[in-house]
Each structure stands twice: as C-alpha cells, then as structure tokens.
Image: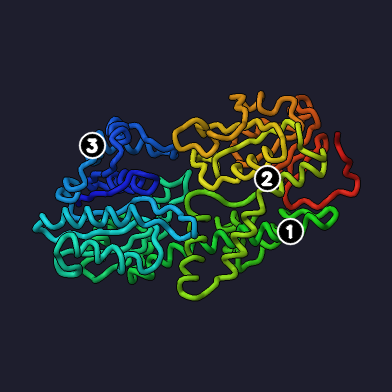
Amino acid sequence: MKISIIGTGYVGLVTGVGLASKGHQVVCVDVDSEKIKKINAGQSPIHEKGLEALLKKALAKKLFSATADLAFGVQQSAVTFIAVPTPSKKNNDIDLSYVKKVSQDIGLALANKKEYHVVAVKSTVTPETTLKIVLPLLEQYSKKRAGTEFGLCMNPEFLREGSAVDDFTNPDRIVIGQLDAKSGDALVDIYKKFKTDLVRTSLNNAEMIKYANNALLSTLISFSNEIANIAEKIPGANAFEILEGVHLDKRLNPIHSGARINPEVLSYIYPGCGFGGSCFPKDVKALAAFAKKKKYQAPLLAAVLDINKRQPLRMLDLAEQKIGSLKNKHIAVLGLAFKPETDDTRESAAIPIIKELIARKAKVFAYDPVVNVNSKNSHFKSLAIELPGSLHETVKNKHACLIVTNWKEFEKLTPEFIQKEMANHLFIDGRGFFRGKQNEEINYLGIGLGKDKKSTHLS
C-alpha cells in the first residue's frame, strides 16, 4: 500500500522505515529540508539501534523517500499517518499546535483528491483529540465528510527508544481506534504481515490505551523508588533484594513447565534515580491534566510525578552523606541520555542532577558515549559543565562519581579502576548497575541500600 507519514522524529521515521521493510511504499514528510536531505542520503538523524541500516535497505529498494511537500505525500498515498510532536505546555497539557496545523494541511490536500483516503493519528494525544479536534479540522479544510468521503483512525505507538525498530517490526500488539469499520479495515490491511494481537476499538479508547499503558509503567517505577527510599532507612537493607523477592510472586512471574517466565515488566520494578524520556513524564502529566479538566484530581498520578521529581536528587543526598558539602568538589556525572542505546536527553535524570550540583557550587564533569552536548537542541549546552571526552578522564581524581545512565561502557569502572583513579573512591550508583558485584574495596553507595552502621565520613 502507498503510505505517507507526516513527521520524521522517533515515531515517524521508525514507522516509515518499518512499514517500508514490510513492502509498503512510504513517503515521509517534514518541514526541515536538511533533515530530508540527510534521510534521503541514508543517514538517520537520530541514534536508534538498527534504524540506519533498515533505512538504507528501504531506499535501495525504492520503497522509501522523504519530502517537504505534504500535499504531494497525501496525493501519492492511500493512508496518511500523523506523527508530529505533542510536547508539554506549562500547564502540563499537551501542545496540539503541530497536530492542528498538519490536520489543516492534510484537509487542504484531501480537498483536491478524488479517491477515498484514510488519516491515522499516531501522535500521542489525549482522549477526544482525534474526534473533537482532528476530525473537524479535516472536514473544515477538505470540505468532505468523515466516514463517507475519507476515513479516520487513531493508531498509538508503543515504541521504546533504544529498541524502537524491533518494537515496530515485532510488536506485542497493534491498537486501531476507528471512526468506522471501513477506516479500520485500511489499517488492518497495512498491518496484515504483522503477527501479533490486534485490538480494534473506538478513537477515544485507543488514545486512552496509550496513556494508561505509560501511566502504569511509570507507576511501577515510582512505586519501586518509594520502597527503595524506605529501605534506605533500614540498616543493611537492600531494595534490589527486597524487590527481587517480590518479583517471585507467581502473579508477577508465573512458573511454566517448572521454570520462571521472567516477564520484561519486572524490569520496571527496580529502584533508580527516576524515569525520563519523551513519553513517560509528558504522558503522565498530560493524563493528570486531562483528568483535572474532567473534574477529577488523579492523586495517584500526582504522587507518581512527585516521587519521580525528587528521586534524582537522592544521589546528591547520598554524596553529601559521605563527603559533606559539595561546594568546590569535583563530581563526575556518567550518562546524559535518559536511558542507554539512545541519544535522547529529554527529561533525563542527569538534567536536575547537574543543575543542582551547580547550584551547590560543585564542579561538574560529564560524560556520555553517544549524546552530543553541543547539538542544537541540547539540554546541557548552557550549563557550566566540563566534558573531558573519555570515561577515564571524566572519573580521574574526582571526589565522587555518579552513574545516571547504565551504558555498557561503564562496566570498565571496576573497583580496582575506581580505587586507583578516584580521590575518595566514592561511587554512587543511581541505576543498580553494579549491584551484586564485589564493591568492598570502594566507597559504594546506591539508591535503595540501607545505611551501614560502620560507614564513615570522607573528607
């Protein structure tokens, strides 16, 4: 099928390349001419495992291209996906300006098209957006009727950054919210080569499924951090051991044929320095704001966000327990991306950590193996930090080292390395990266680890 996708961010580009890999003819549309040029040259503008290789294959087979001409994209396709950003506004609601503008432009393009066309919203939008905002705009600017002259669907994405290509090509489910059966049938046809569970539902339900999914996972993380923060008050306690004991509940981790299944959801029931990224924080805030509009306060969502906001700074509290005031201390911050295998720094725990370190007059040295701190949209560009350029130089002679993102490269930080290179041998693990390792030779602290009565204060 011929498909157009408006937007070439994580969702748009991965969706476009993924559909092309299944044999569809795809054109992606973006307003950024430099980005289009790069994509058409086979260069992915984002760091995502396997994406560039798949992009080059799709281009070589002439199943994929990028353009700035939205009208052309719509005219040349049977289905158009909206995959533009929906960032947070100051009131935590989502900014629908991109969705509205694209809906108008698609409507104008549809006005000059005779064939039946389906528009599918893939951007994450709160319930009632597709029905009450996208649909009226499409009808207004196309002068056509939804349900008869064009179709409308809501098709949420469930892509994890760092494994988005695999998540798209091997999905755990496909959710199709449909205005009517004819609209939904077009998307069913697109996804017929995908072997997975298919959910056909209403537009509002599809929108809510996405938010409920992310809110649940976010809640599991904040719950784990709440348990960890309590465990820290108990001498000798270890939140990782505590939660791993919880993991063995057969309702969470069933036993099949005498063996544990170990479902991936258990990875969200571990403590750390908080969740980040382009989805979880934004989506939980948006759902809470949506609930407030509906005269419901959503206290659980508020608690999830509050715990997550405070969690990154637990690492600084741990550092001060050992070395006192952070003023004039040289602190290494390892990891700027919100998670490994991506260069996305949106809502990264490193942002509040570094800002607070600077506020406490510490001298900050940061390192990430992928993130370009000096890029146009960098969240760290204006911060007073030093970038040694290598893991070794970042850690060498520092008063404390904070691991914020669990990049595999950080496995080089053995106790022997830390003891030899660091001033106080103080290593603060915000991700449980080295839990279970032999760390007696160094001053190892981590979120969720109870105070040791023998702990001493370092100078």
| Most distant residue in the right direction | 454
Residue 253 drawn above or below residue 343: below
The amino acid type found where label 3 is placed reads Lys
Q: Residue at x 66, y 39 (%)?
A: 403
The amino acid type found where label 1 is placed reads Ile
Task: Give whichever of 47, 69 is nearer the camera.
Answer: 69
Q: Residue at x 78, y 36 (%)?
A: 426
Instruction: Write down the residue under mark 3.
Output: 61
Q: Position of residue 152 (x, y in %)?
A: 25, 64
Instruction: Write down the residue under mark 1.
Output: 242
Secondary structure beneath disc 3? loop
| Most distant residue in the bottom direction | 295
* Discs 1, 2 touching: Cβ within 8 Å: no
Left/right of residue 247 with respect to residue 288 in the rendered view: right
Q: Residue at x 48, y 50 (%)?
A: 278
Query: Mark 1 Cα within 10 Å, few/some/many (few <14, many 20+)?
Result: some
Instruction: Write down the residue under mark 2.
Output: 430
Q: Nearer the viewer, mark 1 or mark 2?
A: 2
The amino acid type found where label 2 is placed reads Gly
Left/right of residue 189 with respect to residue 52 in the rendered view: left
Q: Position of residue 301 (x, y in %)?
A: 57, 65
Query: Mark 3 Cα within 10 Å, few/some/many (few <14, many 20+)?
Result: few
Name the quadrant of the C terminus: top right
- Mark 3 or mark 1: whose residue is earlier in sequence: 3
Rounded to the nearest whole Å, what is the CA distance between mark 1 and mark 2?
17 Å
| Most distant residue in the left direction | 114
